[in-house]
Amino acid sequence: MKPTVEFNGQSIDSEVFFQRYQHSASALRSLGVGSGDVVAVMMRNGPEALEVMLAIRWIGAQWCPINWHFKTEEVQYILGDSGAKVLIVDADLLATLPGLKLDALRAYASGVPADLASHLASDPSSHPSANALPSWTAFRDANLSPNTDAAAPRGAMFYTSGTTGKPKGIRRAPATPEQAAKGLQILRHCLGFELGMRALVNAPMYHSAPNSYAMGASQESGHLFIQTRFDAEETLAMIARHRITHAYLVPTMYVRMLRLPAEVRAKYDLSSMRFVSSTGSPCAPDVKRAMIEWWGPVIHEAYGASELGYMTRLDSHEALRKPGSAGLPLPGVTMEILDPQGEPVPQGQAGLIYVNQSAYADFTYIGNDAARQKMECRGLKTLGDIGYLDEDGFLFIVDRSADLVISGGVNIYPAEIEATLQMMPGVVDCAVFGIPDAEFGEALACAVQPVDGTVLSDADISEFLKARLAAFKVPKVFTFHTDMPREDTGKIFKRKLREPYWAGQARRV
């Protein structure tokens, strides 16, 4: 794995970058990090983040990416639950985590952004947290002997959430050589990977799909062009300027690029593009059709999950022929549609989607065996998605049995938000759910039942949640109810709250 990395106009030669992440591997070894251990990584997109994760993979440990929008309580929980031995965090992010306790692990700060470095030079006391931890770069450079003893890779430990509202860590067993080979073939099939690819990564690497995309492209010794964040016109300019051949983009990015004025879109030569990958959230058929008409038949979609890996693939020609489909099951994937009793349903009828993907090593949820066991039926596993297979074997996803909301490719779990909001004075009960959004696919709405006589406003609730949760978990739409619709058991009937927003929509997710 010797990728060339380009970031902010500077290129890092493949041999130099290879030596850098081997030095990082040696530094981690010196801290006692070994096979199966966990290193938490809270870093923005950049060469140092990729270097650290490749080093962790090299020694057979697991990297645990942490969303850098998270607040102190969210980060503290993941650090404790994952059992991380080391934390590497961007220095400026520490200021967003007041009260974070690091007593139980070794922590290091990664490079300070240039604008912050300039500010610190004039007034060091203005940002004390930037100097609160030892520098990872300095520690890495003190370990001058690269670690050339690679261990069996284990992959990342991503955190997902469930109906309890608490995030669940996914711990995967080491891949066998056969599984590793199959996994690489799947990346080549689903994401178009090839040796020497020129790949653009501008989605945040704390998410599983862009993370695996960057790591997989590194295995192909690709030329990676990393951006800190997505910008619609700059993405087009990057493709034209650097003759990019591959990219990972999500439907929200498609929408923003399509909204650019026609004269702006026409300025850029995109003919170098060979394969665009999209996963994480469904793409509206009209958006996909518009992208194919603009970029040509290079747009591909895959259906997958952190737990189960990639399961289907849909190319541009299939997308035009089967609008709204998630594609055909991948070679080697067993897929069945079952009813709640675990029995197969007739072709074309919706039911729970169950799969077996043998290319990926099995996994457990940290401390939650019950949730893991509940997924299984007939030797297959489900994440609660509901769909059907048509007469040609194409999968269509129509709804989710769980309350998961996917907004702009980001998984958001209402139970976590509801549990937080129920602690707000004046709130009797609440329900958070997804509603249609033209740009993000789904947005969050929240129905609130206040205490009798209490008046709450949208601003009151937003302020309460923003102090405790990442901003993307704060609903955009609020409604207030004196009496919530409830099932006979007393549980809030969310379907009745959701239905008015989804009336007339072709898709339910």
Image: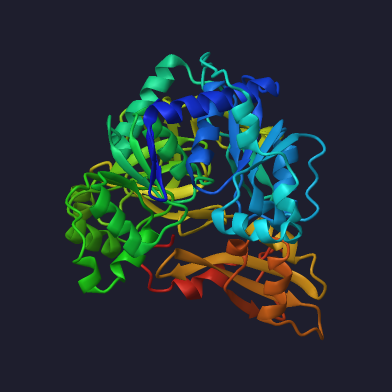
The residue located at (69%, 62%) in the rendering is 418
Which image quarter holds the C terminus? bottom left
Near-viewer residue (490 or 243): 243
- Is residue 362 something one can see in this rendering? no
User: What percent of the width, then of the height, locates residue 187?
Assistant: 35, 33
Q: Quadrant of the N terminus?
A: top left
Front-lying residue, 246 or 290 = 246
Q: Is residue 477 above or below residue 310?
A: below
Please give left or right for residue 149 compared with residue 245 in the image. right
Is residue 132 visible from the viewing direction of this image? yes
Among the 4 quarters of the image, the one containing residue 417? bottom right
Residue 151 is situated, as x and y percent measured from the top left of the image, at 53, 16
Residue in front for this viewpoint, 391 or 324: 324
Q: Is the residue 47 above or below the residue 428 in the image?
A: above
Along the horizontal axis of the image, is 337 left or right of 423? left
Residue 41 spot, x, y in % from top left: 61, 40
Give the residue displayed 21% in from the left and 61% down from the top. 268
Residue located farthest toward the front when viewing the structure as drawn? 122
